């Protein structure tokens, strides 16, 4: 099932952990609707801007899968509102800065990025329909939070 021009449901639900543990990672109707909006609001603009095909690292995670990887029950991934991604050959910080300047979002987190190592970490971005999007942009290095500027 296509969620948008360049992204499919299977790409936004794939998980090696789910496969290994036999977890069915299927979104409900609300999470599916959120994934469609997430693709249209975040992933498609990024794909169109850079013109480089990419597959998200992580999108929707059912609660069982989310717990299996040690993530919070409050993660926006559980509601289909968040995606982690990288674009081959593009500095993850550059991608995060482009999203910050060109997209509406709830949270934008440059996770585990190391300055001077362009392919380190990944970009986490969320979009919500359940309230105003906060446009919160930060960096998390595994220990500390700083503003993305």
Image (cartoon, rainbow, N blue to C red):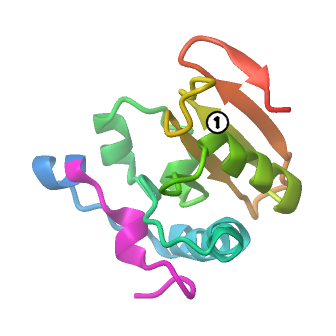
Q: Answer whether residue 142 is visible to the viewer in this image.
A: yes
On screen, 70 above or below 12? above
Q: Answer whether residue 132 is visible to the viewer in this image.
A: no
**Residue at horizontal 58 percent and vertical 48 percent from the top:** 76
Q: Position of residue 142 (x, y in %)?
A: 53, 17
On screen, 51 above or below 102? below
- Part of the protein shown in magenta: 1-16
Q: Position of residue 107 (x, y in %)?
A: 73, 44
Q: Position of residue 75 (x, y in %)?
A: 55, 41
Is 145 left, or right, of 80 in this rendering? right
Q: What predominant SS class does the magenta segment belong to?
A: loop
Q: Position of residue 74 (x, y in %)?
A: 56, 38
**Residue at horizontal 65 percent and vertical 50 percent from the top:** 125
On screen, 55 above or below 92? below
On screen, 95 above or below 75? below
**Residue at horizontal 71 percent and vertical 71 percent from the top:** 49
Answer few, some or many: residues within 10 Å of disc 1's Cα (few below 14, many 20 plus, some between 14 and 19): many
Is 99 left, or right, of 9 in this rendering? right
Q: Which residue is mark 1?
A: 110
């Amino acid at each position: 099932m296509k969620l948008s021009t360049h992204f499919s449901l299977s790409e936004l639900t794939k998980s090696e952990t789910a496969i290994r543990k036999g977890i069915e990672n299927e979104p409900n109707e609300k999470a599916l609707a959120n994934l469609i909006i997430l693709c249209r609001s975040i992933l498609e603009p990024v794909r169109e801007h850079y013109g480089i095909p990419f597959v998200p690292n992580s999108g929707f995670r059912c609660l069982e899968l989310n717990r299996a990887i040690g993530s919070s029950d409050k993660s926006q991934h559980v509601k289909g509102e968040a995606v982690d991604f990288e674009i081959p050959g593009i500095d993850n910080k550059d991608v995060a800065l482009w999203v910050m300047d060109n997209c509406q979002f709830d949270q934008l987190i440059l996770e585990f990025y190391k300055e001077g190592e362009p392919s380190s970490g990944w970009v986490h971005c969320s979009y919500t329909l359940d309230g105003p999007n906060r446009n919160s942009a930060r960096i998390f290095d595994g220990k500390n939070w700083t503003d993305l500027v």
